[in-house]
Image (tube, rainbow, N blue to C red):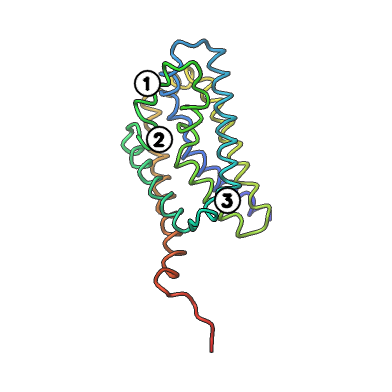
């Protein structure tokens, strides 16, 4: 059981961390807080990280129920979420700002806002469409097994948002230590992993949805 918990934790943490990708948020955070003091930056980073954790946890726990009420099947959402992740991942491989994540207009508007912690920092920069989709799919997988399999997903969200706070609170130091080259290398590596995750999500969704759509389900004998 311990090995299974560790395996689920590693898979969940890698997926959530690389799709939230707090390192790629550093340049945007610095641009939107360029006139703020170090203390205010830390406060903004803390509130944004807590808000992102709440958003991702809420969607992870309630997302499947919401889609069921709306008549949306989980296989369809896995395909849609995989497509969103793929768009995000391809932009990361090209080390260019992804409009799926945040637009230039949102960054410009954020730089003139008094408080950017919730919008656009927590949403959509940290807890964006790709992050939300990943958490919902991971939780849906976890619910096919024992109840405790949901804990690694929630733990991954908590650890990722804690890391986001530490990275953003020390954003100036992070950028100075890693530099633009280091950030680009890490972003490409994260993008490569996200491509694989996106393809797996779409394969899972198609594998679950196509048999029923094409009438290939197993029919009862007799």
Mark 2 secondary-structure assignment: loop
Distance from Cα at disc 3 to Cα at disc 2: 22 Å
- In the rendered view, tell whether residue 100 sits above or below residue 115: below
Distance from Cα at disc 2 to Cα at disc 1: 14 Å
Across and down, in percent, residue 191 comes to 39, 41
- Of badges 1 and 3, the one in the foreground is 1
Please name the residue shown 46% across and 40% down the image: 19
Please name the residue shown 45% across and 22% down the image: 29
- In the rendered view, tell whether residue 118 sits above or below residue 54: above
In the rendered structure, the answer to whether residue 105 lies left or right of residue 65 reads: left
Among numbered discs 1 and 3, the one appearing first in the sequence: 1
Across and down, in percent, residue 10 comes to 57, 46
Read off the residue under disc 3.
Answer: 139
Read off the residue under disc 2.
Answer: 101
Read off the residue under disc 1.
Answer: 108
In the image, 8 versus 122, the foreground residue is: 122
In the image, 83 versus 14, the foreground residue is: 83
Please name the residue shown 33% across and 33% down the image: 95
Among numbered discs 3 and 2, the one appearing first in the sequence: 2
Residue furthest toward the front?
70
């Amino acid at each position: 059981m311990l090995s299974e918990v560790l395996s689920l934790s590693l898979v969940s943490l890698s997926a959530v961390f690389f799709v939230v990708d707090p390192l790629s948020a550093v340049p945007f955070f610095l641009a939107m807080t360029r006139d703020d003091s170090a203390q205010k930056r830390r406060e903004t980073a803390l509130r944004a990280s807590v808000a992102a954790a709440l958003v991702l946890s809420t969607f992870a726990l309630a997302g499947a129920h919401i889609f069921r009420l709306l008549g949306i099947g989980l296989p369809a959402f896995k395909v849609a979420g995989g497509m969103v992740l793929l768009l995000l991942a391809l932009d990361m491989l090209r080390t260019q700002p992804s409009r799926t994540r945040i637009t230039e207009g949102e960054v410009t508007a954020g730089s003139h806002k008094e408080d950017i912690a919730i919008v656009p920092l927590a949403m959509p920069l940290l807890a964006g469409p790709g992050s939300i989709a990943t958490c919902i799919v991971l939780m849906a997988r976890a619910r096919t097994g024992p109840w405790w399999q949901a804990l690694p997903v929630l733990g991954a969200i908590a650890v990722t948002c804690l890391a986001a706070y530490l990275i953003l609170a020390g954003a100036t130091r992070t950028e100075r230590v890693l530099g633009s080259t280091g950030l680009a290398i890490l972003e490409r590596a994260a993008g490569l992993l996200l491509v694989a995750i996106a393809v797996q999500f779409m394969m899972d969704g198609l594998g679950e949805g196509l048999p029923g759509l094409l009438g290939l389900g197993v029919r009862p004998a007799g």
